[in-house]
Image: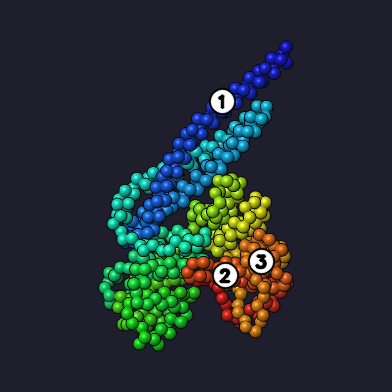
Amino acid sequence: MEVALSAVAGELVSRFISFLLNKYHSSRLHSQEKVMERLQHLLMRVCTIVEGADTRYINNSGMMMQLKMLSEAMYRGYSVVDNSKYQALQDGASSDVVSSNDSSTWSLYLAKRSRTTNKATHLELHCALEDLEIVVANMAEFVILLGGCECMSRRPYDIYLYIDNFMFGRHAEKQKLLSFLLHPDPLGDHALAVLPLIGGATTGKKTLVAHVCGDERVRQRFSSILHLKGDNLLRILDHGRTMKGVMLIVIEFVSDVDDDDWERFHSFLIRIGRGSKIIIVSRIKSLVRFGSVKPIFLSALSHDELRYLFKIMAFGSVDPTEHPRLLQLADEFAKVLHSMQSSLVEITVFADALRRSLHVQSWCCILDKGIRFLKRNLSMYGMQPRIALLEQGHPVDITDVTSHPHSMTPYTINASIEKPPSVTAAELLTDPSVRPKGDFILILWESRIPPYESFVYFVTSRAQDTNQGSTLAGRKRRGVPV
């Protein structure tokens, strides 16, 4: 009798727990669905405003700051929405396990774990919603003023045929650069306006300048656009007679410049080009001393921006919600790439490789290779295997990518030597068997938008590093960005 009563009591307790769990989950899900619906509605409005702002010329500095805040809140909101969707799928899987398991202890364990995760997700949703509501509430004047801004001419739609054939983000920075170029200098035409554009390697400095220089109004504003190297700064003095009209001079500096040389260059341009303007492009912060206006600093992408971009590029035209496990792996990739301070080039390479095969096993393999590659070079050099590492003369170890002891150095042109076979980094990450025998050229990435930068490297066996280093030192380098 006691055994029967104990069994009945156990069954009743189990059913009561299941009843409470179902009631709790249904009420929590209903509340969370409302928050999600409101958040997605606001994201749609914010995305519309940001896209609209990208088609206008904004001159007001306050509006530029608001645009930056709006875009940051948008990327953060998209990140939270994706996390919540994935958590909902996990909860669904957990509830199936609970319903098929008779153990009340196991049910309580799953319920406790689910409550902890749900609380964090629910809090994250509410925070993102509050941030967006605050930003949108202050956007009424912004939208009204935006309607009074002049529209940009629309580019042909065929430039968007490729998923990576566009410039991502930098909304406020683009508007600041356009405002600088299109409006007269406050000091008058006799002054020479100088804007420093400062940022780390592969943060998109030259891409931003090329994008803005392609604007129709900018091309009409300047009679000519000159691109100079900082180490040849004074060569322009020999061409004074041929330089006429209002010019835009873009100067790339890889090292600092003497103040006297800059003064000679600056004075020369003032004499011959009234209304001309200069953009300084460099990684060197001390060059801001030559600016006549507030400099633009390009920082690395935030985690939310990086995650948004990486997801778009990795999935391409495929709906990420159809592959929840891959969506989770994309988040893992984004966390690793952001923690390692990876460049836009590295982000593009990994995304391109993932897009070639939408399978969990393939993505896990590439993620494992990427983590081991980054950690190996961090332990060897004490820094990430970025472009700067190569420029300092250190060969980057890519053993984890090629599945063979290899390292890469900047590729240089030598007409007397037959060009080695080549392979792209995405192909190598997806299938190491495509690796050519012997030395080869690794095409890390080739940009499809101006300035059409290419990142090409020479790969040798680790045993040949010392000999190859001395051979390559005297050659002309190619494909190394400022």
Q: Which residue appears farthest toward the top when viewing the image?
A: 1
Q: Where is 176 relative to 80, above or below? A: below
* Front residue of 314 and 343: 314
| Picture quadrant where residue 385 is located | bottom right
Q: Residues within 10 Å of mark 3 (few under 14, many from 20)?
A: many
Whole-Å distance between the Cαs marked 1 and 2?
Answer: 59 Å
Q: Residue at x 72, y 72 (%)?
A: 438
Amino acid type, label 1: Leu
Q: Residue at x 36, y 58 (%)?
A: 64
Q: Residue 344: where, in percent of width, then height? A: 53, 62
Identify the element where label 3 is drawn: strand
Residues at discs 1 and 2 in contact (Cβ within 8 Å): no
| Picture quadrant where residue 53 is located | bottom left
Which residue matches tag 3? Answer: 397
Residues at discs 2 and 3 in contact (Cβ within 8 Å): no
Give the foreground label among 2 and 3: 2
* Front residue of 136 and 5: 136
Amino acid type, label 2: Phe
Q: Quadrant of the N terminus?
A: top right
Amino acid type, label 3: Asp
